[in-house]
Image (cartoon, helix red, strand yellow):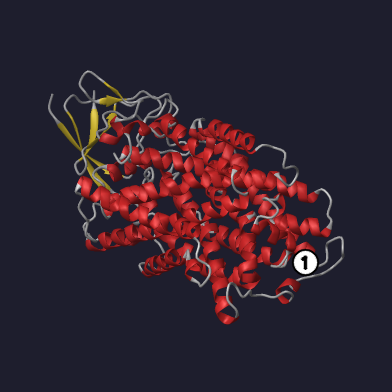
Amino acid sequence: MAVLAYHVRHNLGRPKWSPDRGRHWNATSEDFPAKIKAYHKDNGLTLNLWPPYVPPITMGKLEGPEYKHSPEAKKSSDGSIHEKHDSEEALTSELISAGSESLQRKLGGKEIQLLAVGGAIGTSLFVQMGASLPKGGPASLFLAFVVYGSVIWCVNQCFAEMVTYLPIASPFIRLGGFWVDDAWGFAMGWNYFFLMAFAIPYEITAINVLLTYWTDKVPVVAVVMACLVIYAILNGLAVQYFGTAEFYLAIFKVFLMIGLICYTFVTMVGGNPWNWAYGFTYWKNPGSFVEYLVPGDTGRFLGFLACIIQASFTMVGPEFISMAAGEAKNPRRLMHRAFSSFIWRLFIFFLGGALCVGIVIPYDDELLLKYIDGTEGGTGAASPYVISMVKFGIKGLPSLVNALIMTSVLSCGNNVVYSSIRTLHGLAADGKAPAFFAKCNKFGIPVYSVIAVLSFCLLSLLQLGNTSATILNWLVGICTASYMINYFATVVTYLHFYAALKRQGIDRRSLPYRGHFQPYAAYYAAVMTLIVTLILGYTVFIDGQWDVTTFCTSYLMIGFFIVACVFWKLFKRTHYVRPGDADLQLGDIKAQIDLYEALYEPPKRGKISGWFNSWFE
């Protein structure tokens, strides 16, 4: 039989931003019409076009090391990889692409949007923010959140442009290894893993703090074990069920934060048991700014720095969106939507929260000060909102809000457990951690990574020897340093990505997401995150304020990052990738994602379901 040649135009539903839209593939068949294949000459991918499977789209031989690791892929007698799918939806959801090993793309738009909210809204917003109010005052607190808000927005632009271009598992970590230096990626990965891992006992400690609002007779061990079991159950489920659980948990957070903003407005205009329209009274008495550690303007500036540090711990989010990239159903579209909506979360939740905290209570509130210095042993009234409600004598509402805050903290803890697991899985998949951490069960759950991460819950038992407030402060110091290092390293990775786009002649207008004000936004973010990193422990350098614990928790992760980077560079003899020389295709990984998106078909929905999901997708 003669060999027939075809020219197949590569549209296949490609989104308008795809740089390869309209590219032509060569299709050949030796036994027409028994078999027709389309072969992509640039990356070696082969797509069966005939005979069609019913449903009509099928995947035949798919070459690529990432896909061959999938447990669903089976070799036929000729060595090619074939899969049998019951539906087109199964085909697109089981096509494991772009280095996600055996993770499964089953997270939808609403799950990803609420996953981002769930990770960003938690203990720091409802409880820990009050700890910085006596240091800087309400005006410093709000201004600090505005200033740092501009930084985190620029960081979000860097995350968004890279992750939507290559939505792979643990993207910003792995891209640092590909585009800067493998040692850079190694240090980034382990820094982020420990950031998320140490955030787990932080959230559990906060749950215990909130629980003491009702009683202090519940043993710390019981609280820790209960949280461990809950996190094990939620993260042991298939990812779509995890996403659904997190969706409903995060909804509570959204309504809670909106409710607290409404509470602030209603009470400040006189809707309280005292009929007192207090407005911004606390900004006048005791005042808007606090002289922290030293008198005068210097003291007020130091108070502002303390609030900046609090803001850098509270205002997070881009990394939580990124960690879901390897499991998103329609990754580029969903990632684009999630990153674009970050600005609204920034204004409503973070800036709104900072403003409300300074309105509802004065910075010298007696109960708040007792919590901060630990004399209350970690009271559940640590939340400024609960303190305000108790002060007004509102019955029932403080308990309700405290319970909802506990649910919020539990959700945030669940989110950091998820991110820790996926980070460890990604490190193992790249050979930067023991290989067994990358192994997944048939549901796509990296079981050994789950077990390793859950062991960090036991660090919450440190409360047995110290007050809860002290433990929270230790963990805040470690996590804040890790956040800043992570953001700085990601921005450096972005600058390499930007240089490679420019040198290789790729128009940024063709990207799925084009960041604003680049590369100047990246320069600004790099400088600011570096400055914040260096001032984290500034109080220890003031006369009479030296504290070994504060110094160690503030700067420990800087030393760890440097040591990890040097160790991997010497051990693996890695090579620095000069800006502009980065492989933006990552071998055939980008082509696999392109092919996955070409075949993806949105699930059919009813009118109501379609309308609801359109808000998220």
Task: Examine the image and state in which quarter residue 132 appears.
Answer: bottom right
Task: Examine the image and state in which quarter residue 558 appears.
Answer: bottom left
Foreground pick, 338 / 575 = 575
- Given the current orientation, which residue lies at the most extreme top position? 77
Please tell me whether mark 1 sits on a helix, a strand or a loop.
Answer: helix
Q: Residues within 10 Å of mark 1 (few under 14, many from 20)?
A: many
- Given the current orientation, which residue lies at the most extreme right position? 274
- Residue 615 position, x and y percent, is 57, 49
Foreground pick, 311 / 157 = 311
- Residue 354 position, x and y percent, is 63, 64
Residue position marked by numbered label 1 in the rendering: 268
Q: Is residue 83 left or right of residue 338?
A: left
- Given the current orientation, which residue lies at the most extreme bottom position? 296
- Residue 76 position, x and y percent, is 25, 20
Q: Is residue 432 something that shows in the picture?
A: yes
Q: Is residue 262 above or below residue 517?
A: above
Q: Disc 1 marks which amino acid?
A: Met
Q: Residue at x 50, y 65 (%)?
A: 546
- Residue 320 position, x and y percent, is 48, 49
Task: Examine the image and state in which quarter residue 201 appears.
Answer: top right
- Given the current orientation, which residue lies at the most extreme front position? 544
Q: Residue at x 79, y 70 (%)?
A: 278
